[in-house]
Amino acid sequence: MNKNVTVQVCMGTGGMAAGGAEVLAIFEALMKEKNIPAEFKKECSMHKVGCRGLCAKDVLVDVIVDGARTTYQYIKPDMVQRIIDEHITEGSPVAEWQVTDEYHKFHEKQVKVVLSDCGNIDPEDIDSYIEAEGYKAIRKVFTSMTPEEVIEVMKNSGLRGRGGAGFPTGVKWEACRKAPGDQKYIICNADEGDPGAFMDRAVIEGNPHAVIEGMVVGAYAIGASKGYVYIRAEYPLAVERLTMAIKAARERGFLGENLFDTGFTFDIKIKLGAGAFVCGEETALIASIEGQRGMPRAKPPFPVHSGLWGKPTVINNVETLANIPYIIKRGPEWFSSYGTEKSKGTKVFALTGKVKNTGLIEVPMGITLNEIIYDIGGGIENNKKLKAVQTGGPSGGCITADMLDINVDYESLAKVGSIVGSGGMIVLDEDDCMVNVAKYFLNFTRDESCGKCVPCRIGTKRLLEILDRITKGLGKEGDIELLEKLSSDIKSASLCGLGQTAPNPVLSTIKYFREEYEAHIRDKKCPAKACRDLLTYSILKDVCVGCGACMRACPAAAITGEKKKPHAINDELCIKCGSCFDVCKFKAVNRE
């Protein structure tokens, strides 16, 4: 057989969790057992690749025969044999296991820059990245551009920091280059900690070399000889692949001394974080690298003037840095052709929650929420009604279903009380209680506060206490106004971004879902039927057939009744777990 065959297995965190490693191992074992590589006169190879985006369909496997790509979904180890026999050997792809139109629609409106090589290259093989024009950008920079020209390219591209603040990258680099100092640093902030966010993690797992190359370009532009990647230790796969990539880049001369015979020296170290969300704030991150407690300090001075060990320092997040090689190679005009007037380029989002197609997406700035949720995400699970979309994580806010035509960019989201943030996007449906959503995020920010300043340390705790009371039916008149007043004080008086944005979920849910707060406080009811303490259960006697399923499921022995006769719930014994409601096939259990 005279074929070129390549098998690519998704081995991002999602793919591995679904069994990607086992699938790849079976492919390798069976291909060897059948002596397929020897039978083919051309190339036959198997690769692990990073996140393919549509995590809901893992394990995703690509089989490429003479350039013709077939993508399979939900692949398990026991399915590999048939793919090898029918597709690779006989040339007939297995039709029923291939991805459906839903997979293609998921990618239709996406524009991939940062993710363009994720899922296509082997993140553990530097040659795979080089074959995809990797490290071409730094070769261009070192051989034909001055640092000032690199900075100008960044400014013209319109690239803004993708870590949440959205500060212009070129302006930040220019300020650091002009800052006096014999030693300068560049830091990659990979301390991604928002609930439901996995953008930076997936990029490092799928294409660590793009981040390294972006750091080298940035170091050259600002005049830094040392760089750090600050990444949380809870990302073991990302840390492993980044470590391998840095080692390989050093061996190939892309890191180290006298790069491209220019006399320029730059190297990177990895600093593991302990999972403190506050260390995503740049001054707290710097303190952690220096060996101090991860606590923010007042600004100014800003890190570009006095950062790591008091030296001028640029801090960019993973996605920002991963954009840079592509901008250098293709030009600032190409990048700025995507997006809006003030929000250029694309943005990576982790699309999660009550949406059918959960996963990692990259879209042009300015796309509407409606397109993301319904065209890319496939709509709401179980055909439920969309209630809201939470963007920006604990620092963001909720956007209601009647605002789906809003453009997703920095300015548009800010106008409605939310933010782009680092890229978390959680879809909520009619079963989600908005008071409970605010409580969830406040619980997170309360736990993650470093405790340095009183407004954040005490204020978030008091907000959480009030929300907790409300969800337990103990709310009282004036609580909503108290939440608003306290939130305003926390925002204006907190030291860093964590405290300044912590009240956002509270304020946005009050703004758009005030009636839910009022129902909890005045009627002692949760409209979404999600707050356990506000629920009551009863059995409809004219519907109950006495099957006994609810009685068997009840862990508190609160249900009594004879077989084939209506049952009853003892309110004093009922713990409101909902087991009876879940098991009743006849909808005889009433929950309100």
Image: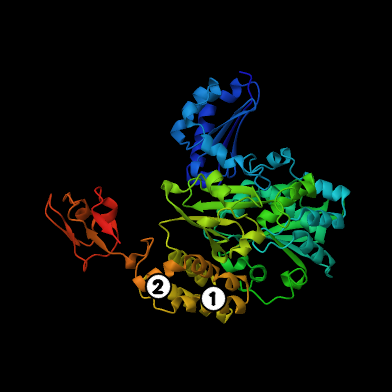
Query: Against 454, is 546 above or below?
Result: above
Q: Quadrant of residue 286?
A: bottom right
Q: Amino acid at mark 2?
A: Ile
Q: Quadrant of residue 167?
A: bottom right
Q: Residue 3 versus residue 263: which sits nearer the camera?
A: 3
Q: Amino acid at mark 1?
A: Ser
Residue 346 in view: yes
The answer to whether the residue labelled 1 contacts the one labelled 2, judged by CB atoms less than 8 Å apart, is no
Q: Which residue is mark 2?
A: 470
Q: Residue 517 versus residue 75: which sits nearer the camera?
A: 517
Q: Position of residue 106 (x, y in %)?
A: 56, 42
Q: Secondary structure at mark 1?
A: helix
Query: Against 8, is 456 above or below?
Result: below
Side of 258 where 169 appears, left or right: left
| C-alpha separation, residue under disc 1 versus residue under disc 2 | 16 Å
Position of the C terminus, as image quadrant, is bottom left
Identify the mark at residue 487; answer none if there is no mark.
Answer: 1
Identify the mark at residue 500; answer none if there is no mark.
Answer: none
Position of the N terminus, as image quadrant, is top right
Side of 245 where 63 appears, left or right: left
Q: Position of residue 403 (x, y in %)?
A: 55, 57
Q: Residue 497 versus residue 290: which sits nearer the camera?
A: 497
Q: Residues within 10 Å of mark 2 (few under 14, many from 20)?
A: many
Instruction: Identify the mark nearer the N-term, 1 or 2.
Output: 2
Residue 276 in view: no
Q: Secondary structure at mark 2?
A: helix
Query: Against 191, is 98 above or below?
Result: above
